[in-house]
Image: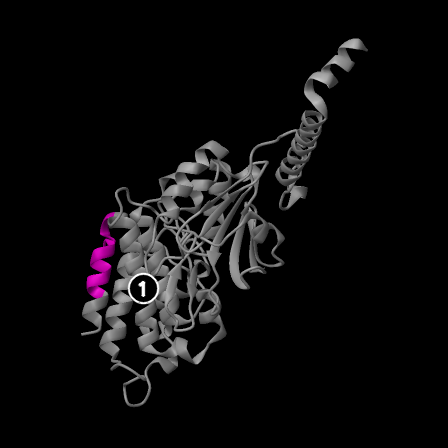
Amino acid sequence: MKIAHLLILVLGPSSMAFLAFFLAYFFFYRKRVTTHVSKDIESSEHKNEDIVQKEDLIIFQGGENLTICDILDAPGEVIGKSNYGTLYKALLQRSNSVRLLRFLRPVCTIRPEELDDMVLLLGAIRHPNLVPLLGFYIGPRGEGLLVHPFYRRGNLADFVRDGNGECYKWSTIHSISMGIAKALEYLHTKLQKPIIHGNLKSKNILLDRNYQPFISDFGLYLFLNPAAAQEMLEASAAHGYKAPELIKMRDASEETDIYSLGIILLQLLSGKEPINEHPTPDEDFYLPNFMRNAVLGHRIADLYHPAILISNGRDDQIMVTEECILKFFQLAMACCSPSPSLRPNIKQVIWRLEEIMK
């Protein structure tokens, strides 16, 4: 008791007040940080409540105004779901902007310490026909959330399926094809180390109000562990975009991307969804069923919209001829060659698309 009284006398009333304030502030600060870190998204995904890591938000060009609260508190609408994650259309209320948020399940991703390099690699990529990564949130249990711009025209698969009048126009078909090809050229040839898309399909091509294409999800499989990446590949195969030689996602290459591009070109030309059915051994074409039957039966006209050639041979911008369509079809078929060595590279694809328009 004497020691306590002596301490009070030595410190004095003002010093004791400062000490009390410091202790209160320290307690409040610790409490605030703990509450913040315990915040989570899709918390039902996590079964081990003992795992605690520091959450983080990495911001890239275009995402300077993003905050963790904006992202986690944004009301969202589910517009896509897979085994490895969920895609949301979300309204960030503070900035009143709509964004695409892709949640990656922790059990499907690589280790958080490995994610950093991949995030920085993809976050630095900017091209007029690639969907940019604006931000990446790493949650307290290793969950990932990618933030992208939202494109109001939706994806190419819906555009083709809906039969919008624009999808019949040769100028639109050619413009979309060229935009996709130029984006792939950037990924394959313009970076210090080429990036393979690995999951190129019409659902991963978004359109703006002017029908300009933006490739999304490029390199997404790099974030996934081998099992989840393989599930992504099998889903791609079921929809008809998988090259015949591609067995494991880790073996994805520029040639397998070119094969997927060829299927998309045929889809644009035909207005039909590819459905993957393996050919019999005596068939030469590994193609979706309707495409293979048309080719083997020499019914090239079955592969394009009846409305693509209008009476005067011109759409709203450019001349359209049977020769143009035939060359476009031949290019798509070359991309879909069963032999990877016979497929054109992306620079050759762009050159031939330019030739078609001359």
User: Mark 1, residues whose alpha carbon is within 10 Å: few (<14), some, or many (≥20)?
Assistant: some
Q: Residue at x 32, y 84 (%)?
A: 316
272 or 41, nearer to the observer = 41
342 inside magenta stretch: yes
**Above/below status of 220 relative to 89:** above
| Image quadrant in which the C terminus is located | bottom left
For disc 1, the marked residue is 179
Q: Secondary structure at mark 1?
A: helix
The type of residue carrying mark 1 is Gly
Question: In the visual, does 73 lie left or right of 269?
Answer: right
* Residue 137 rendering spot, x and y as whole percentages: 52, 44
Q: Residue at x 48, y 46 (%)?
A: 136
Which range of residues does the magenta coloring cover?
341-352
Q: Residue at x 38, y 46 (%)?
A: 122
* Residue 185 rendering spot, x and y as whole percentages: 27, 55
| Image quadrant in which the N terminus is located | top right
187 inside magenta stretch: no
Question: In the visual, does 258 lie left or right of 142?
Answer: left
Find residue 142 and report its image quarter. top right
Q: Residue at x 39, y 66 (%)?
A: 267
* Residue 58 rendering spot, x and y as whole percentages: 46, 44
195 or 12, nearer to the observer = 12
Residue farthest toward the right in the current orientation of the protein: 1
